[in-house]
Image (spheres, rainbow, N blue to C red):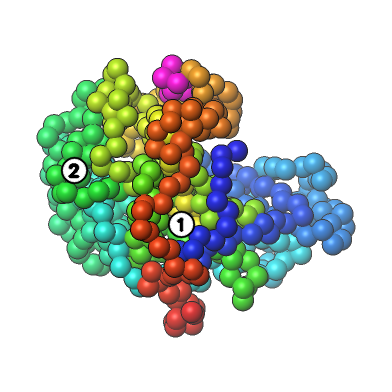
């Protein structure tokens, strides 16, 4: 595992995510339930506590007409969520957020709270988008957060995006976004998103900013996850403020050698399992803060984005091999739609057919010293040895060898700094803290 900083960093918002797993979890694939947006199937989970576990599992087995044991992890049921609740609880309780305990207990109130307040990001925010003007998920999320952004689109799509952004979302006009027409239809080069990423990098340099945010276009919300004492659980709460980005920027700017930082995918921040505040020196992707003067020269690039596949992973590996640090936040996370489940973007071009295999093999060809190809999620997937990446970075003698180095004169205040954020209780319609 990569080196991690699990503790609460000084001068940052509260973000403790302790391990609170159930004794046993049963995954139920529901054949009659419409999958969520961006998902291939509908999944519900049934959690069990250790007390009277065998008795409760036997009762669930009887109610679902299934053979179950402690080793049973997943079952498939010919029903939907309402039907599952009927079988488990005789109609007395509903299943919320696709998860429940047996015997029934109230679900953790993730959607009850949102975070508001505080200033937004100080660095420019860019979204790259293709063929998704009718469903601009990331742009809508940033609109709710009141974060200014630029969505960069190809000339062939420009008028369609322009028409959408001249209209409204949830009854309100789009106020914070600028639709920027790229210099060409970069997708025609057959290099995936690489050319437009470098085009955006050039745009960011022209602003004079030290860093820029680059976001995929399939992120419907951004969350803040941490332990909430009054509920005695970890909650993944929606952020309706750009202050989460400002906090990430502040952390990166403390150090001389943070090249790339960003937010983890929400699906890897499972609230009950416990997570570090942030993780040092591994891949950062999809919602990324990049240092504008970063250059990692190779024979086939000018030191920025290159190739056709795995652009995020390749850039991070190259940074680590030359001693730079990368920082991935868990307490702040992006609820990104799963790859290959939303039309548009690279789905139809890069991932069709044996695209996943080509993607994995491409990264191994670029970095045969640290990448293998293995099977994950029933498909070919690259597997990166980040320990070796860091070892190579240390051996390079550059940029403090993948160890964070504070800028001279930097003073970090002790304790927690919420960056102006406050938690709002939607049920009670009042501030909760």
Residue at 75% over, 61% down: 102
The residue indicated by pointer 1 is 332
Q: Secondary structure at mark 1?
A: strand
Residue furthest front in the image: 409
Secondary element type, mark 2: helix
Does 167 lie within the magenta span? Answer: no
Please indicate, yes or no, whether residue 50 appears anywhere in the rendered image: yes
Q: Residue at x 87, y 61 (%)?
A: 52
Task: Measuring from the top left, give residue 336's x and y in whole percent.
Answer: 43, 47
How far across and how far down the image is residue 257, in percent? 38, 43
300 relative to 238 in the view: left or right: left
Which residues lie in the magenta part?
A: 358-367
Nearer to me, 25 or 392: 392
Of circles 1 and 2, which is in front? 2
Crowd class of label 1 (few under 14; some 14 to 19; many from 20; radius 10 Å): many
Q: Nearer the viewer, residue 323 or 165?
A: 323
Q: Is residue 260 above or below residue 14?
A: above
Density class for disc 2 (Cα within 10 Å; few <14, some 14-19, many ≥20) is some
What mark, if any, has residue 205 been given in the picture?
Answer: 2
Q: Tell me which corner region of the image, top left, top right, bottom left or bottom right, holds residue 168.
A: bottom left
Instruction: Classify the position of the N terminus by image quarter.
Output: top right
Residue beneath the point at 25% across and 67% down: 171
């Amino acid at each position: 595992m990569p080196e991690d900083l699990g503790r609460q960093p000084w001068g940052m918002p509260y973000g403790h995510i302790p391990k609170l797993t159930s004794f046993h979890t049963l995954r139920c694939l529901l054949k009659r339930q419409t999958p969520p947006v961006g998902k291939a199937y509908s999944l519900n989970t049934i959690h069990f506590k250790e007390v009277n576990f065998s008795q409760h599992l036997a009762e669930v087995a009887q109610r679902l007409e299934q053979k179950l044991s402690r080793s049973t992890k997943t079952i498939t049921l010919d029903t939907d969520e309402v039907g599952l609740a009927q079988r488990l609880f005789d109609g007395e309780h509903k299943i919320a957020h696709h998860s429940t305990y047996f015997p029934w207990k109230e679900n953790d109130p993730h959607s009850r709270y949102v975070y508001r307040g505080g200033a937004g990001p100080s660095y420019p925010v860019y979204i790259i988008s293709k063929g998704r003007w009718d469903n601009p998920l990331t742009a809508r999320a940033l609109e709710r957060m009141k974060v200014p952004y630029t969505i960069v689109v190809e000339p062939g799509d420009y008028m369609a995006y322009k028409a959408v952004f001249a209209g409204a979302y949830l009854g309100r006009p789009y106020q914070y976004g600028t639709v920027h027409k790229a210099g060409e239809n970069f997708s025609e080069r057959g290099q995936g998103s690489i050319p437009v990423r470098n085009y955006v990098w050039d745009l960011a340099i022209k602003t004079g900013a030290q860093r820029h945010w680059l976001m995929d276009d399939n992120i419907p919300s951004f969350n803040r996850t941490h332990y909430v004492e009054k509920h005695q659980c970890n909650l993944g709460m929606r952020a309706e403020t750009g202050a989460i980005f400002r906090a990430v920027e502040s952390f990166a700017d403390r150090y001389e050698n943070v090249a790339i930082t960003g937010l983890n995918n929400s699906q890897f921040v499972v609230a009950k399992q416990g997570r570090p505040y942030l993780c040092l020196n591994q891949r950062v992707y999809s919602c990324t803060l990049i240092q504008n003067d970063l250059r990692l020269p190779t024979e086939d690039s000018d030191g920025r984005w290159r190739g056709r596949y795995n652009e995020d992973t390749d850039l991070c590996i190259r940074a680590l091999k030359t001693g730079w640090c990368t920082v991935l936040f868990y307490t702040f996370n992006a609820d990104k739609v799963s790859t290959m489940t939303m039309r548009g973007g690279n789905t139809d071009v890069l991932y069709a057919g044996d695209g996943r295999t080509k993607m994995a093999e491409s990264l191994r060809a670029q970095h045969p010293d640290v990448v293998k190809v293995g099977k994950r999620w029933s498909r070919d997937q690259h597997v990166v040895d980040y320990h070796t990446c860091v070892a190579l970075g240390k051996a390079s003698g550059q940029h403090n060898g993948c160890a964070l180095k504070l800028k001279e004169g930097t003073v970090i205040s002790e304790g927690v700094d919420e960056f102006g954020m406050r938690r709002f209780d939607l049920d009670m319609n009042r501030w909760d803290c």
